[in-house]
Image: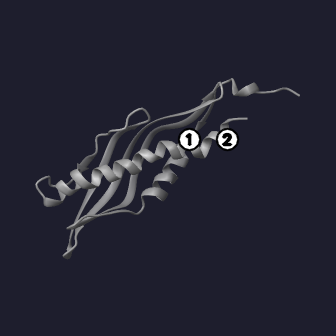
Amino acid sequence: MVVVNPKNWHWVEKNTIEWTKQYFETEFIPFVYDADKYVVEIVSIGDIKGDSNVSQRKGKVICYFDLKIDFSVKVSTKDNEDDVIDFKLDIPEFMHDEDDFLIEYLELNKSHDSYKVLSEEFRPVFLKKLLKYQEDLIGSHSKEIQE
């Protein structure tokens, strides 16, 4: 019998981009943030492009990812259900070694009252949930790549 990877010494890598797409669909649809005056809801995931991998070498599990993610979002006013704003939320570089990302609100009028809620209240809650991805990625795949 030949041991292929004794003591997990050699580099093993697993592409996790398909798992990533499913993860974001499951974890972020729907994602609702309830503010005083507004309700912010992620209604769909657009494109997820880039790389996502879990690897191990010398028994240590690591992940690396560099993703571009687009979300479709709606903001509705609590006191007027007909007042709905649809826009795109874009993260051009979501990377494994950073914990603060550029979050762009495309097609949204920055002078609208909801912009302040999005940037000051929604953003930190959304970012916290987004950062959980790395932990979940490693947790879901670490056993598969170690013998």
Q: Secondary structure at mark 1?
A: helix
Frontmost residue, 13 versus 143 = 143
Q: Residue 128 appears at what percent x and percent y? A: 38, 48
Q: Residue 12 appears at what percent x and percent y? A: 65, 30
**Residue lying farthest to the right in this orientation:** 1
Q: Residue 90 appears at what percent x and percent y? A: 31, 47
Q: Residue 114 appears at what percent x and percent y? A: 18, 59
Residue 147 lies in what quarter of the image? Answer: top right
Q: Residue at x 40, y 51 (%)?
A: 129
User: Horizontal placement of 68 versus 140: left or right?
Assistant: left
User: Horizontal placement of 20 versus 14: left or right?
Assistant: left
Q: Which residue is mark 2?
A: 144
Residue contact between numbered discs 2 and 1, judged by CB atoms under 8 Å: no
Q: Residue at x 46, y 57 (%)?
A: 27
Q: CA distance from mark 2 to mark 1?
A: 10 Å
User: Horizontal placement of 6 versus 112: left or right?
Assistant: right
Figure disc tally: 2
Q: Residue at x 42, y 40 (%)?
A: 67
Q: Which residue is mark 1?
A: 138
Alpha-carbon neighbours of circle 2 within 10 Å: few (<14), some, or many (≥20)?
few
